[in-house]
Image: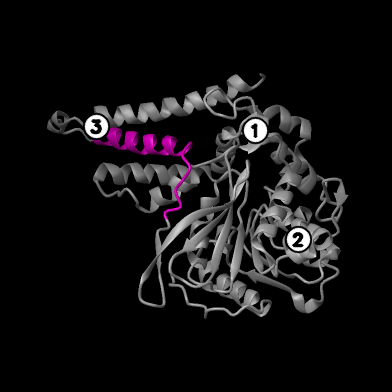
């Protein structure tokens, strides 16, 4: 049971910090302390409130929080989240819009499995719902999956996408965001040979590391700076006694969060310091900008060890997708076999995670596609988040993606509605 106690120690530290925050908040909130004109009391209570909320969010799966959307008929249409195909490591879910006819655009959003829940794409879902019938891959937290369910690596991820596409049918349009872009491309190529009728109509790849070496960043080049032995020795742990997946080898979400925070440590430190001051002054709200962002950002999930390690070894180190030598279930996948699925890539000019050049490499791999079924778009001033959820997505990229879908689909569609402009 090596590393199991390490996992429990990390969880114990999280719980301790949450307890310290709640204690400070409670102790410094007694009315009698208001008689003492000491700002330190308010600051301590504010620190406790921010600290308690932050550490509590780290183990909570966020809600989708999507309840209704306005319709062309002047009514608000209720949204319900339905599980279409349940699987041990992730479900195919659907956002059903009650009282609305099908739009003709059936979209599968492929969410990343990179430390955050699929709710990271909440704003993407919201922007697509008025014009599309939206489905998404809802990956489960590995700490909650019993060891008896077996392994889950990049090949299993690819086969899950294959099963989801078969379930949804051939009139599907896939939008893969970031990390799953190479595997969505592989799943499409797999279907091209094994079950051509189940292929999607279009495949949109957004900011994905198809060829990490095309324009290396600190993130994509990480695999070249460490050995697989070092990764396995230093970042892989066993789930502790508290969760259903006790004993499962994972890459812990809390460890991934530490890496996320370290990349912009000064920015995060200032954000929390400013929030403490706002709470102390009574200027903060439960759903203010800070809480809205960090409630999602701090909610992390564990990845199975085999998925994390196989991603680094095969996608980043071995470049199996970039060199068209990816193997799924003992069969080599040939991306050149994609001949009918229109493929579009989207990149951000200021993307420091998956730099321009990494994603567009997919088009060169699609040797069987005619030029008219290939498209690429570069949003010059967008960062990584902006190309799928920020202002650049809403104002520029989303309309282009919907036009691309419409140009490659014969199903009657409802007119595209403009989304409101908002700050990124």
Quadrant, the N terminus: top right
Instruction: Determine crowd level at label 3: few under 14, some 14-19, many 20+ residues with C-alpha closer than 10 A.
Output: some
Tell me which numbered mark, 2 or 1, is placed earlier along the sequence. Answer: 2
Closer to the camera, 23 or 77? Answer: 77
Decide: is 275 above or below 349: above
The magenta stretch is 41-65
> What residue is rendered at 54% in x and 28% in y?
243
Alpha-carbon span between mark 3 and mark 1: 41 Å
Secondary structure at badge 3 equals helix
Alpha-carbon span between mark 2 and mark 1: 28 Å
Secondary structure at badge 1 equals strand
Q: Is residue 178 left or right of residue 49?
A: right
Residue 60 rendering spot, x and y as whole percentages: 46, 39
Instruction: Determine crowd level at label 1: few under 14, some 14-19, many 20+ residues with C-alpha closer than 10 A.
Output: many
Residue 41's tag is 3
Tell me which numbered mark, 3 or 2, is placed earlier along the sequence. Answer: 3
Do labels 2 and 1 touch, CB within 8 Å?
no
| Residue 352 sits in quarter | bottom right
Residue highlighted by disc 1: 250
Residue 173 rendering spot, x and y as whole percentages: 65, 67
Q: Is residue 63 magenta?
A: yes
> What residue is rendered at 53% in x and 79% in y?
414
Q: Is residue 117 left or right of residue 23?
A: right
Nearest-to-viewer mark from 3 and 2: 2
Nearest-to-viewer mark from 3 and 1: 1
Nearest-to-viewer mark from 2 and 1: 2
Residue 188's tag is 2
Decide: is 7 above or below 126: above
């Amino acid at each position: 049971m090596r590393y199991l106690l390490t996992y429990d120690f990390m969880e114990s530290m999280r719980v301790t910090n949450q307890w310290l925050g709640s204690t400070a908040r409670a102790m410094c909130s007694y009315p009698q302390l208001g008689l003492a004109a000491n700002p330190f009391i308010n600051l301590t209570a504010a620190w406790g409130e921010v600290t308690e909320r932050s550490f509590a969010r780290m183990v909570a799966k966020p809600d989708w929080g999507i309840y209704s959307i306005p319709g062309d008929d002047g009514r608000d249409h209720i949204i319900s989240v339905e599980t279409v195909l349940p699987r041990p490591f992730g479900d195919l879910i659907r956002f059903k819009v009650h009282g609305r006819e099908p739009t003709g655009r059936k979209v599968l959003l492929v969410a990343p499995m990179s430390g955050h829940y699929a709710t990271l794409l909440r704003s993407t879902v919201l922007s697509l719902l008025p014009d599309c019938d939206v489905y998404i891959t809802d990956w489960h937290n590995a700490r909650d999956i019993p060891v008896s369910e077996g392994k889950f690596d990049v090949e299993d991820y690819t086969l899950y996408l294959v099963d989801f596409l078969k379930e949804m049918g051939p009139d599907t349009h896939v939008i893969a965001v970031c990390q799953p872009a190479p595997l969505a491309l592989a799943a499409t190529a797999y279907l091209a040979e094994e079950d051509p009728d189940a292929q999607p109509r279009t495949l949109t790849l957004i900011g994905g590391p198809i060829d990490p070496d095309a324009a290396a960043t600190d993130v994509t080049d990480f695999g070249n700076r460490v050995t697989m032995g070092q990764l396995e020795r230093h970042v892989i742990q066993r789930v502790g006694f508290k969760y259903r997946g006790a004993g499962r080898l994972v890459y812990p979400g809390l460890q991934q969060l530490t890496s996320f925070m370290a990349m912009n440590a000064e920015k995060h430190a200032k954000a929390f310091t400013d929030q403490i001051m706002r709470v102390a002054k009574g200027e903060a709200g439960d759903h203010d900008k800070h809480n809205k962002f960090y409630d999602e950002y701090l909610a992390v999930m564990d990845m199975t060890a085999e998925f994390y390690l196989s991603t680094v070894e095969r996608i980043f180190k071995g470049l199996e997708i970039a060199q068209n030598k990816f193997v799924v279930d003992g069969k080599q996948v040939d991306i050149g076999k994609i001949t009918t699925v229109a493929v579009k890539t989207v990149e951000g000019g200021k993307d420091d995670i998956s730099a321009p050049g990494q994603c567009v490499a997919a088009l060169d791999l699609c040797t069987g596609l005619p030029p008219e079924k290939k498209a690429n778009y570069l949003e010059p001033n967008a960062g990584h988040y902006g190309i799928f959820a920020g202002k650049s997505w809403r104002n520029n990229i989303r309309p282009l993606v919907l036009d691309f879908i419409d140009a490659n689909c014969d199903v009657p569609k409802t007119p595209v509605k403009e989304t409101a402009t908002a700050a990124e």
